[in-house]
């Protein structure tokens, strides 16, 4: 038969071992939390051959295609990137006719900010077949504004050409304003006489 002192020693040894193990686990949890906090991007999903149609009441509003879309889930700001190009076609809700398009080398959708970025050889068109070209274009879905802080060239109706250091417009690209603008404006001489 073992003495009570021996049981006390075994119990103390078990208690001490448990405390060491628990504190080791807590330290490991702290490390895991630190790593998680510093983790920048986690790929949640990759989509190859994206072909997305957005409709409302059986009317197509947007048709988006991209060879690849990667959905990144970050701790603070999730986003989706289309690194191999993106093509978006917009349709008029009432007529169903194409009302504009945007093509770019890269597209980024920032979900929380309600902002879509287009980078690299961006070409956007509106209902008048006017074309806007730039290295970048931002579409703010909250304010319904489109803008670029890089040089832009617009081929406008009537053959007019506008160049600007930057520009801003409504999201339909019908009311653009250019900063530091230069351009070629065609004037009908018969109309001025």
Image: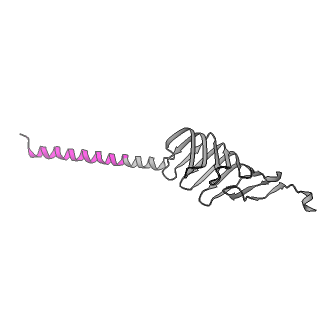
User: Viewer-proximal residue, 38 or 193?
Assistant: 193
For this orientation, the residue located farthest to the right is 193
The image quarter in which residue 148 lies: bottom right
Q: Position of residue 138 (x, y in %)?
A: 65, 53
Left or right of 122, for residue 67 = left
Residue 43 vs residue 61: left or right?
left
The C terminus lies in which quarter of the figure? bottom right
Which residue occupies the extreme left position in the image? Answer: 1
Q: Nearer the viewer, residue 155 or 183?
A: 155
- Residue 16 forms part of the magenta stretch: yes
At a point 28% along the width and 46% down the height, the residue shown is: 20
Main SS category, magenta section = helix
Query: Residue 30 appears at what percent x and percent y?
Result: 39, 49
Check the picture and name the quadrant holding the N terminus.
Answer: top left
Q: Is residue 111 magenta?
A: no
Q: How many marks?
A: 0
Image coords of residue 90 (percent x, y): 64, 49
Q: Is residue 109 above or below residue 179?
A: above
Please tell me which residue lies in front, 18 or 68.
68
Residue 165's image quarter?
Answer: bottom right
Q: Position of residue 88 (x, y in %)?
A: 64, 46
The colour mode here is: one colour
Residue at (34% x, 49% y) in the render: 26
Does residue 56 appear left or right of residue 132 in this picture? left
Residue at the bottom extreme, as displayed: 193
For residue 81, what is the image quadrant? top right
- The residues colored magenta run 1-28
């Amino acid at each position: 038969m073992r003495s009570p002192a021996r049981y006390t020693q075994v119990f103390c040894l078990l208690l001490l071992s448990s405390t060491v193990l628990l504190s080791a686990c807590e330290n490991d949890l702290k490390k895991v939390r630190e790593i998680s906090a510093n983790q920048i991007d986690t790929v949640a999903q990759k989509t190859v051959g994206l072909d997305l149609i957005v409709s409302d009441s059986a009317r197509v509003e947007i048709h988006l295609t991209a060879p690849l879309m990667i959905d990144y889930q970050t701790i603070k700001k999730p986003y989706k990137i289309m690194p191999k190009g993106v093509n978006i076609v917009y349709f008029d809700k009432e007529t169903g006719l194409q009302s504009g398009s945007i093509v770019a080398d890269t597209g980024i959708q920032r979900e929380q900010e309600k902002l879509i970025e287009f980078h690299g050889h961006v070409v956007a068109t509106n209902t008048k077949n006017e074309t806007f070209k730039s290295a970048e274009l931002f579409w703010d879905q909250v304010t319904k504004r489109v803008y670029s802080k890089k040089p832009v060239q617009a081929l406008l109706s009537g053959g007019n050409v506008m160049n600007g250091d930057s520009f801003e417009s409504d999201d339909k690209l019908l009311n653009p304003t250019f900063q530091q603008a230069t351009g070629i404006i065609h004037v009908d001489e018969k109309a001025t006489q």
